[in-house]
Image: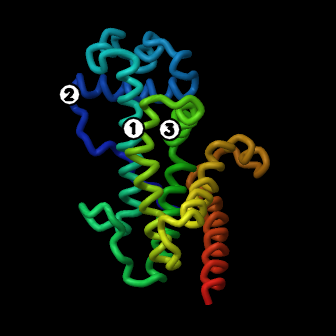
């Protein structure tokens, strides 16, 4: 059974204003992902958050500012998950991967990162809202996608590439390494995007921790096969 990551917001939102702001961000994330930015009214967001409609302008300056805040929430959330999954893969404050003790340790770290990120993406309800929001941004990019790419996509992918270099000796920024890392991430993301089809085909009523563990096990087998192939080709 995989251990689900801790996704609690590290900030303490205790005042009424903080709680309202947080509720509006979560409502916007949910509705923008489900209905799109243009298809969602501020009135709907306020109703979902059980807040006064005027609080959107007060806290964010308007709907566009709320979209930016939702993007920042995604960045903060995924940075927390990536920090838990890849904490040992980067030297604090260096911006570069810290050398693993040996390639075997780096490979173990790849498996641990896959398990941790898979547990969040597959089994955490909020991951569905995040993925929906991001998919809409990828289809119709706005400044919100820039915030997410610069805050999450690029640095997390780069860190995984650095870890791959430590594990295999292949250059972190080679085209092959970058594409390989995308395939590893994509395998996990598919099970969230294609969640309904997967549940029907597998006969599952939901994808919780137990089902997520089975998916992560299958993806880990793929990682093992890729690593074995790459290491074998270097002999």
Number of marks:
3
Q: Are marks 2 and 1 in contact (CB under 8 Å)?
A: no
Q: Residue at x 57, y 50 (%)?
A: 122
Q: Against 184, is 29 above or below?
A: above
Residue 62 in percent (x, y) is at: 35, 15
Q: Quadrant of the N terminus?
A: bottom right
- Which numbered circle lies on residue 15? 2
Give the image's coloring scheme.
Answer: rainbow
Q: Splitting the image into 4 quarters, where does residue 68 fall?
A: top left
In three-dimensional space, the C-alpha distance between marks 2 and 1, rounded to whole angstroms, equals 27 Å
Is residue 193 rendered to the left or right of residue 104?
Answer: right
Q: Residue at x 56, y 29 (%)?
A: 140
Is residue 223 rendered to the left or right of residue 90?
Answer: right
Q: Secondary structure at mark 2?
A: loop
The residue furthest right is 201
Is residue 74 rendered to the left or right of residue 205?
Answer: left
Question: What residue is pinned by disc 1?
Answer: 147
Q: Secondary structure at mark 3?
A: helix
Residue 71 in percent (x, y) is at: 41, 34
Nearer the observer: mark 2 or 1; the answer is 1
In three-dimensional space, the C-alpha distance between marks 1 and 3, rounded to whole angstroms, equals 14 Å
Q: Residue at x 52, y 75 (%)?
A: 170
Residue 163 in percent (x, y) is at: 45, 70
Q: Secondary structure at mark 1?
A: helix
Q: Are marks 1 and 3 in contact (CB under 8 Å)?
A: no
In three-dimensional space, the C-alpha distance between marks 2 and 3, rounded to whole angstroms, equals 25 Å
Q: Residues within 10 Å of mark 1 (few under 14, many from 20)?
A: some
Question: What residue is pinned by disc 3?
Answer: 130
Is residue 178 rendered to the left or right of residue 59?
Answer: right
């Amino acid at each position: 059974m995989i251990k689900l990551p801790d996704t609690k917001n590290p900030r303490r939102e205790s005042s009424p204003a903080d709680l309202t702001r947080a509720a509006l961000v979560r409502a916007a994330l949910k509705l923008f992902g489900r209905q799109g930015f243009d298809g969602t009214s501020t009135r709907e967001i306020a109703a979902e958050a059980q807040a006064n409609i005027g609080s959107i302008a007060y806290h964010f300056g308007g709907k566009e500012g709320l979209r930016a805040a939702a993007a920042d929430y995604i960045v903060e959330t995924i940075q927390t998950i990536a920090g838990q999954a890849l904490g040992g893969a980067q030297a604090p404050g260096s911006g570069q991967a810290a050398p693993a003790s040996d390639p075997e340790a780096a490979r173990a770290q790849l498996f641990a990162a896959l398990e941790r990120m898979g547990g969040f993406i597959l089994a955490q309800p909020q991951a569905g809202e995040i993925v929906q929001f991001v998919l809409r941004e990828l289809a119709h990019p706005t400044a919100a996608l820039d915030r997410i790419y610069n805050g999450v996509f690029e640095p997390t992918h780069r860190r995984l590439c650095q870890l791959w270099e430590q594990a295999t000796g292949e250059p972190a920024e080679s085209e092959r390494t970058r594409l390989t890392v995308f395939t590893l991430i994509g395998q996990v993301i598919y099970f969230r995007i294609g969640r309904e089809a997967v549940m029907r085909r597998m006969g599952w009523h939901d994808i919780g921790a137990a089902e997520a563990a089975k998916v992560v096990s299958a993806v880990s087998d793929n990682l093992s096969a890729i690593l074995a192939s790459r290491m074998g080709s270097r002999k």
